[in-house]
Image (spheres, coloured by chain):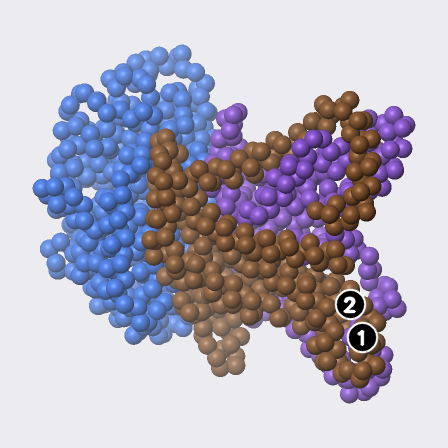
Chain colours: A brown, B purple, C blue
Amino acid sequence: MSSRAEPVTAASGVHKRRGLLTWVSRDGLSTFAFLLPLLLIFGTFSWFPIVRSFVMSVQHTNLVSPPTWVGLDNFATVLSDPLFGKSVANTIYFALLALIIGYPIPLALAVIMSETRRFKGLYSALAYLPVVVPPVVAVLLWKVFYKGGPNGAFNSILGNVGLGPIQWLGDAAMAMPAVVVEATWAAFGGTVIIYLAALLSVPPELYDAAEVDGASILQKIRYVTLPHMRGILFITLILQLIATAQIFTEPFLLTEGGPANATTTVLLLIYQYGFGSSLGGHFGEAAALSLMLAAFLGVFTAVYFWLTRSWSTES
Amino acid sequence: MKLQLPFRHSRKSLPTAQRGIISLADWHKRRIRWSVQSLHAVTLIGLLIVGLGPILWLAKAAVTPTQDTLRQPMALWPNGFNLDLLVQTFTKVHIERFFMNTVWIAIGSWLCQITVATSAGYALSVLRPRGSRILYGMILGTMFVPSVVLLVPLYLTVLDLPLVNIKLVDTFWAVWLPAGASAFNVVIIKRFFDNLPREIFEAAQVDGAGPFRLFWSIVLPMSRPIVGVVSVFAVIATWKDYLWPKLVLPSLAVQPLSVRLPDLERGIQLDLFLASLAVATLFPIALFLMFQRMFLSGGALSGAIKG
Amino acid sequence: MTVKPIRAKALTMAALAMFAVSACSSSSATTAPATTPTTAPNATPVASAAAADTHKATTITVGALRPGATQEAVDALNSQISQFTAKYPWITVTSVEYNWTAPTFAAQLAGGTLPTVFNIPFTDGKGLIAQHQIVNIDARVRALPYVTKFNPNVLVNGQDTDGKIFAVPYSAYGNALTYNRTLFTQAGLDPDKPPTTWDEVKADAKIIATKIPGVAGFATMATQNTGGWQITDMTYALGGRMEAVDAKTGKVSATVNNAQTKAALAYLHGLRWDDNSMGATFDYNWGTINADFAAGQIGMFTGGSDLYTAMVQNNALKPADYGVTIIPLATDPNAGVLGGGNLAAVSVLTTEDQRDAAVDWIDFYYIERLITQDGAVADAQALKANNQPVGVPSLPVFDKATYDQSQLWIKDYINVPTAQMAPFTSKIFSEPLFVEPLYNTQDLYATLDPVVQAVLTDKNADINALLDAANVKVQKIIDTPAS
């Protein structure tokens, strides 16, 4: 990848590689020694499981009896499961809400924070603090905040201004937004930091030029800052979509997929297939659903790769 | 890919080397200055409430008896506080054990990731044996497979390691070794090595350095910055990981904090539970305050190339 | 054969129990699962006991402590372990924390990380046996002197279809109505006169919720299969059943959309939405409902009659708060108390020696306290010395006479507020008791969880439609052959 991105280096690399190659040819064993960790670890924990997930998706296995070939039955089972549609809808809903709630806020914050003259470090530290809290702690803490009665932390604040109490997690309509808000809280700091770095890469001359044309601050943001950040914005968008499609810890610990499956995401369903029944897993169905999700995410990943590639050569 | 991107902008150089959206001229206009400053004040207050507030609440709840937290969650110690709760997180919950498990998991995962990534990066970038392009392609390919897909097959793999039939479940190895299979690490380290000047390698070769010597004495010392980046990712990832350790480390003796804490929710009373959460948060926050710059630049980098 | 106070009315139950008895008398074991020990079925452990001197050093792990147990509970177990190792010096016992929950058990099972001896609820016995995931310990258990005294209706949960014993029942409970006496008093109710009908439960719940803001008058579990469990509990109390077996064909039909389950859900709907007396937490599981009850957040809830122990060990329950009474039963002739209990089982990943040792441990730790005076007294002493509850209401695992006898033995050690448990203990033995649905029980419960959640969190939940859909799903699970 990089060799294609930087043709000059690559050409010289080829030239010099020959010398290195002959040098190494005496030493094939040591090359192999350097490759060994890679081959062992990737072979066992990456390539083999990937192949295995394809195999498992067409098998029925419970780890006790020998696996049996079932063709596409697992896929059919998953597709006919009423929870499948529900979980896909929930995951899309989650992703959408996460975009609406979680996407503009970090950008606005970063733009504001990049203009601070004092306490710059304080702003970023405060924004980043939630990211530092271990995610499991964050979820469990928010679960306490979300306690439904009038004595819940959030509800007692609302109560002071005469609102609520709200059933944050105990209401099918509220549960997903509540999960998204928690997830956003836990993650927004990281995105802010990324945008702050990106804002620094906007060439100051562009602002100078805009000012010559008499642009106001908002116009500068609209016509200089945002266009320049288009690349990184799109990348964080893709990354966020990939991440939200795999959301697990938050709904698992906050709501266990409830109430009434209102927050059962695709990953939660995979988990339920594999590990949800006390009598042993439906690993085939879990593998089948995983592959379907992977195929879907592969598209996003490809877009992401394509983007980062052109973006990195640009900058 | 420019890896050094976020590192090059140090905080101090900002005001002089960089200008932002607002020009000096803008800044001199009273109306603009006033509105920008009040916007900043609002933002700061908002960040204080949102970023710090929940953590302060947790700190408060950690020394508040259950009944007070349940009845008046926002009140400050209406009936006094109970420092003994913090002691109990050690004497009753034994939080230090799970903390140490977390540390061990982090150290081992880090070591495994660094070993695999640097040796592989070196082999693929510097030694370049035949077929290394295919190998590299196979590594890149795994980046298209989201980790969730591997959940079940990887679980079955650590249950019964192929060929050798060893069960890794309930040992740290079940987390350490799979952590090493990070394509992302290999890719960024290889790219970094690609950019190292070849002349140095040739000079070393002329001096009679073998591949091991070259790796240990020249390549590794030169790659300290990128190894630092990978290290930060490795440690952060260990803190965040929940599902995988939950599956493969069911025994108390090996559980990290992230696996233990949710179980405590149903096992102990609320005040002690919140105290445990608070103690579990202390360490990462202390680390963050100590190495703030590293966290922030690492965070920026992670977004720029990984996410 | 049928013990007097336990009127086993369900045909299937009686049939199974008889099946079990007939299997006992037949000496030929025909279907030994592949994973069972290779010893001949009639190789009696008496032989191994005779060879006690030559026992090999064996280590077993036992899962007898719940996560988060207090130091006192740990100490109590440790003293029991040292008593055990004094008796069986060649066995080393390692204690691990273990708590059966439906979602974690599968991973532990698949991961082979279960202790050597672990407990499972009655509901999982048959499924695990069918999948060869627990060991046949028939010969070992049958060598124990008291094996014939097991209550057959209880023992059946750990037997395969041929009556071979794979798991040993050691505790049984009836579902009961647990209530907070302190909250009753605060609300102006008489804690010595707990409700005896569902209408009274409803009325009292409303009073508690109204008079004590922030407290749930009545709460119910809803996650990790406990929602399905408790709605089944209410269904049985109203006279309904979740499964039906065709007497001729043996075909099992799901009947979760029966009239009584609908009535039970409608009842909960009323408490939740008309009276607003169910508080604000609708995702309780077994552990969290105990925690909130102990924290004084819940007036009443239904659950096992033996919860006192867990709430003292884990949730710092104030004994004065605790009250338990019999679950209200409808006048329907089929109405009865849903029972339940625990089995001790042995992991398949064990050596022959470990299996011997495991049964020794089951005998010592789980059974002796129920059946011998020495065991009962030693157990009570150890528990009492460590401030652990002695005398928590349970149901007989053996015959009623043995149970009464054991209660007499430990009389002097009882440290629980028995008077507060009297509303339960004085009536339970005269009420009909039923075992849980026999087929795919936990899957059935899991399917009903979202239904219970929907009723509690969605005012417009369509109970009929939800139950019809759940019934289709359960039927599908029942029809899927066990792998």
Is residue C21 in view?
Answer: yes
Between B306 and A291, the one lying in front of the other is: A291
User: Which residue corresponds to mark 2?
Assistant: A202
Q: Residue at x 25, y 19 (%)?
A: C41
Q: Residue at x 25, y 64 (%)?
A: C465
Identity of the residue furthest to the left in this view: C248
Q: CA distance from mark 1 to mark 2?
A: 9 Å
Give SS at disc 1.
helix
Which of the numbered marks, if any, corresponds to residue A207?
1
Give SS at disc 2.
loop
Q: Quadrant of residue A111?
A: bottom right
Q: Residue at x 40, y 25 (%)?
A: C350
Q: Quadrant of residue C79?
A: top left
Identify residue type, mark 2. Answer: Val
Q: Write down the chain letter for disc 1.
A: A
Q: Quadrant of the C terminus of chain C?
A: top left
Identify residue type, mark 1. Answer: Tyr
Between C273 and C190, the one lying in front of the other is: C273
Q: Are marks 1 and 2 in contact (CB under 8 Å)?
A: yes
